[in-house]
Amino acid sequence: MNEKSANILELPKILEKLAQYTSFSGSRELALKLMPTPDLNVARELQRETTEARALLLAKPDTHMGGVTDVREAALSCQRGFVLEAAVLLNIRSTLRRATNLKRTIGKLGSQYPLLSAIADTLEECTPVQNEIGRVLDDAGLILDSASVKLATIRRELRISFERLHSKITNIATSQANAKYLQEPIVTQRNGRYVIPLKAEHKGRIPGVVHDQSSSGATLFIEPLTTVELNNRYRELQIEEENEIRRILTALSEMVGESADKISHTVEVLAYLDLVFARAKYAHALDANEPQLVPFRTNMANHPGGTIKILGARHPLLNQIKVVPTDVELDDNTFMLIITGPNTGGKTVALKTMGLMILMAQCGLHVPAAYGTTLSVFEDVYADIGDEQSIEQSLSTFSSHMTNIIQILKLANSRSLVILDELGAGTDPAEGSALARSLLLHFLERRVTTIVTTHHPELKAFGYERPGVRNASVEFDLETLAPTYRLMVGIPGRSNALAIASRLGLPAGIIEQAREMVATEDLKVDDLLDEIQKTRDEIRHLLSRKQEEEAEVDNLRLELVDRVENIEHERRKILAEAREQAEADLEDLRREIRRMQRQLEGAGQPLDAIRQIAEQARTVSPADYLKTPDPVEKPSNGEVQQFRLDEVVWLPNLKAEGKITEIGTDEIEVLVGRLRIRAKPNELERRSSKERKKEKRTAMPELYDGPSTQFDRGKSPGLELDLRGSRIEDAVPQVESYVDAAYMAGLPFVRVIHGKGTGALRKAIREELSRHPLVSKHMSGSDKEGGEGVTIVHLVTQN
């Protein structure tokens, strides 16, 4: 790829931006050296790598290159006998650890990220090197005592020697006898020896070796003779320690040298992998998309076969929020685009944007353009750009332009892209125009994909006269006298000089005189272009409105779908709640029937009616429970009794009384104890108090008159029943009989004393009370009444 053209199109600046997303020097170097590939398959693979990396970083944002450094030179130096410092060895271990982590992490996701997995699979873990460095060094780079047996022994002796030396010299420094000779009672170091500060006038008072003196000469730093041997031994051990550490680092460096090639390869792979991650991060920052790369078509007679379809492209070096997107598409009949328009209108930026999109795509970078951008992979891109409009602000003379173009003519072919800015500028307009047309005709005949900008109006006609050529222009707003920077393919640029002069206030007479000097054909062309521009604006406005309406329809449709889903969800929720309630009510019904059945069995009464009800209850399902009941036939005699809410009625079939809680058209709901029963009006009877008591005595004589009961039903059984010490099987029947007797005696409430204990007796008694139809509620006693050891039982109100 032509390096000069890449520089002209500002690819190095893009690579500088890319390098900012790398993690270490190795990958940064690769980023700065990145060049577009002319191979379609390679370019496609690069794009897929970037796409995989974006997906991986999105799914696993903790994937990074932390701890990686470029240790290639250090590793290779070990092959030449160099001994590495502890910090460098730690860098090698850290790099290898990150390589191991990435290899295993990405390897597990091989089916999702096959290209990245293939790259990571080539990483060398060098596990023995990692383990040995970790065994010898701690995380701070210090040699561990366990690095060798000899080092452990030396350090143990070193600690003992230091303690002896320090104890001895500290005693000398703090001795009261020596206090008058010393400046301070401290121990310090000079030249690696432990010394004490002696006043100069007392030299010789403490025998020793002078190692230093203060700047004033008032203090001498002496090593007492009694500590010389201890100091010597301590220093000898220090030297032995240094030698052993040197030996250990040498052995480690030799081990690194044996794996230097693998380590170097691992760093190279990590650098490339980090470059792929950097491409992904840069793409995310630009909100870029993967372009579709296609081969050159070979079945086209008068067309080179290249494809350029750029949608919503944004120059990556400009403000991505403010920049105006560029749309360019060369159809099957076009491979040369001539862009005309005023200065500062954005022609050069549009030119560079198109060139950069192609170079970035062939570098494996996602492009800041919309989905659907489709490009061919060119063998080379040649550019000649340079004027006062240039982003580089570099001026080019006519001769330098010609020199570049001559070189391009020699190198360009049908698989090349040629980008020329201000073709024919910098010389006589007539000659420049003729030269520009001749060059374009030459590129056209050689079928070279070409994009040029120009000020020469004659090239507009060239764009209409020649097949394969199409005009384009940058839009200019006459109201604001400012360019919109929007590229319009298919419409040549028009001269706005007279219109601009008029808007700025130039006298009308001068404007009209100038208009008369302009050729009639040119005025007609300008009027025609003006009409085309107005029509294009109207179509764009209508299209924009249509898109807004379609978006609004889509939003309404989505809102409607959400509403329908919410309604369906609510319906299912209500049905589920109703079904749960039905199941709970049915369970209550079955439980009450079982209780009544036990009472009837205990009373020795016929069970036919209750068995029939129980059988019906067993066959009822929640679905049946939720159905609307069929209308109930009225009594054959046509008479319907009138009942009131809260009225107490008698149910002959159940031989029980209950209270009316709901009156329907054909059914009445009656509360019998805790059981709610629906019955037809002709199945209910009104009874006086005496009749109800008589019916109860007839239905359950044992309950009132039998000899097996413990209490006399006509008399009060007392307000308390003490069951402490009773067994559960004895206490429960007593509670039931006691409550019945208390009810018959007209007591409003009673107290059952069961004690606290393990709580088993209390639980059984309260379960029995919960089932008893004559108990309205029960609760624990207050602290004064005995708390949890007592249950207060409230009986139902008697009529």
Image: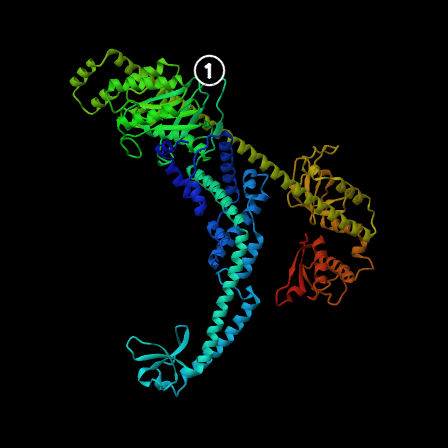
Q: Residue lying at the far top in this picture: please name it.
A: 520
Q: Kindly identify the residue that appears in the image at 39 percent across and 78 percent down.
A: 195
Q: Position of residue 260 (x, y in %)?
A: 52, 50
Reply above or below: 296 against 234.
above
Q: Quadrant of residue 498?
A: top left
Q: Quadrant of residue 712?
A: bottom right
Q: Is residue 106 left or right of residue 545?
A: right
**Residue 350 in view:** no
Q: Position of residue 324 (x, y in %)?
A: 36, 30
Q: Is residue 184 left or right of residue 729?
A: left
Q: Quadrant location of the N terminus?
A: top left
Count of number-bearing discs: 1
| Residue type, numbered disc 1 | Ala
Q: Residue lying at the far front in this picture: please name it.
A: 80
Q: Position of residue 16 (x, y in %)?
A: 38, 41
**Residue 318 in view:** yes
Q: Position of residue 188 (x, y in %)?
A: 39, 75
Q: Quadrant of residue 458?
A: top left
Residues 536 and 762: in front is: 536
Residues 109 and 740: in front is: 109
Residues 680 and 515: in front is: 515
Residue carrying label 1: 301
**Colour convention:** rainbow
Q: Is residue 60 left or right of residue 486?
A: right
Mark 1 surroundings within 10 Å by alpha-carbon count, few (fewer than 14), some (14 through 19), many (20 or more):
few
* Mark 1, secondary structure of its residue: loop
Q: Residue lying at the far bottom in this picture: please name it.
A: 177
